[in-house]
Amino acid sequence: MVKKAILVTDNFLSKENEETIYAAGFELCRLPVHCAAQDELIEALKGKSGYILGGIETVTAAVIKSVDSLQAIVYNSTNYQVYIPACDKATKRGIAIANCPGADSTATAEYALTLMLAMARNIFDIGRTGKATEFIGRSLDELRVGIIGLGNIGTSFAHLLKNLGIQNVYYYSRTRHAAEETELGIQYVSKEDLLSSCNVVSIHTHRSAGEVVSSEELAQIQDGGIVINVSYPEAVNSASLIREIKKGRLRAAYDFPPNDVLEEARSVSPGQFFWANEYAGYNTSSALRLSGDMATASIINLLTTGMDTHLVNPDYLNYRTNEEAAS
């Protein structure tokens, strides 16, 4: 009997994960490329039953159309729609999709905290990366931090803030989280009140939320405010943010460059607007180890039972023929 093959991209999965996959009766094929091109991915997926997306390649409609035996995709983080924009087409081809919710929550929250502290003390402009010789920053007891989105990462961020002794922590979310309010001592407020009262606004929303801070809402943030965005660039109106930064009214730090205004953004200093060259918040050894364990378990579950705790598109079963479901 020919074993089903699983493709893994980038240098993802530990030796222990590999051994688990082999012990479950599958072959493992690697594509050790961080950002595989579409044609490269199409070729690599030929004959593969499973696919663990460990890089930053994009699963396009053309990729989904080309696959000949793919049954399951597991993305190694949370925002799977970013890298699998053809998820609806995959569902309609009977391909299961799972992700790894919470695997990178602590790491990304730590990164948001790092950015916040660096911006509060203007590390990028007063150090050798900049030209400033002095800057009056804010101490922790001066920070009023507003969190937009209290999912796994937003909650982890709130934990870190409170553990540092930051007293004034507020949040806005489409769903109120009473248990977290009690446990952490954070306060639920309207988005309008959060934006107008906080000197740090940190965004932790899912990409499906779209633009969560509009041009009009940016104008509500107090002068000298800091915008931290470790979600996705489109969460904030980029053109308006650049205008506010150039006026000297706001500063910002992102986990991914705002490509729609990138050239204009390069005209300001890192201390005014900092961003990572690629998504970097999740890149810690412990986060990658946890996501590797989760991805390994999910791909095995999907290929053996068709179900998994982290399955995001259960409707895929409606598009499987009886023969496919049994294979």
Image (spheres, rainbow, N blue to C red):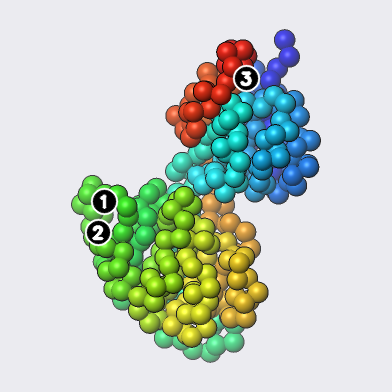
CB atoms of marks 2 and 3 within 8 Å: no
Q: Secondary structure at mark 2?
A: strand
Q: Is residue 65 visible?
A: yes
Identify the mark nearer the N-term, 3 or 1.
3
The residues tagged by marks 3 and 1 sit, at their Cα atoms, a distance apart of 44 Å
Residue identified by numbered label 2: 188
Measured along the vertical axis of the image, is residue 235 above or below residue 287?
A: below
Measured along the vertical axis of the image, is residue 166 above or below residue 307?
A: below
Q: Please state if 201 lies on the left or on the right of 49 as rendered.
A: left
Q: Which mark is residue 176?
A: 1
Q: Secondary structure at mark 1?
A: loop
The residue lying toward the viewer, choosing from 323 and 291, is 323
Residue identified by numbered label 3: 23
Three-letter amino acid code at disc 3?
A: Ala
The residues tagged by marks 2 and 3 sit, at their Cα atoms, a distance apart of 48 Å
Q: Is residue 106 visible?
A: no
CB atoms of marks 1 and 2 within 8 Å: yes
Q: Position of residue 83 (x, y in %)?
A: 60, 46
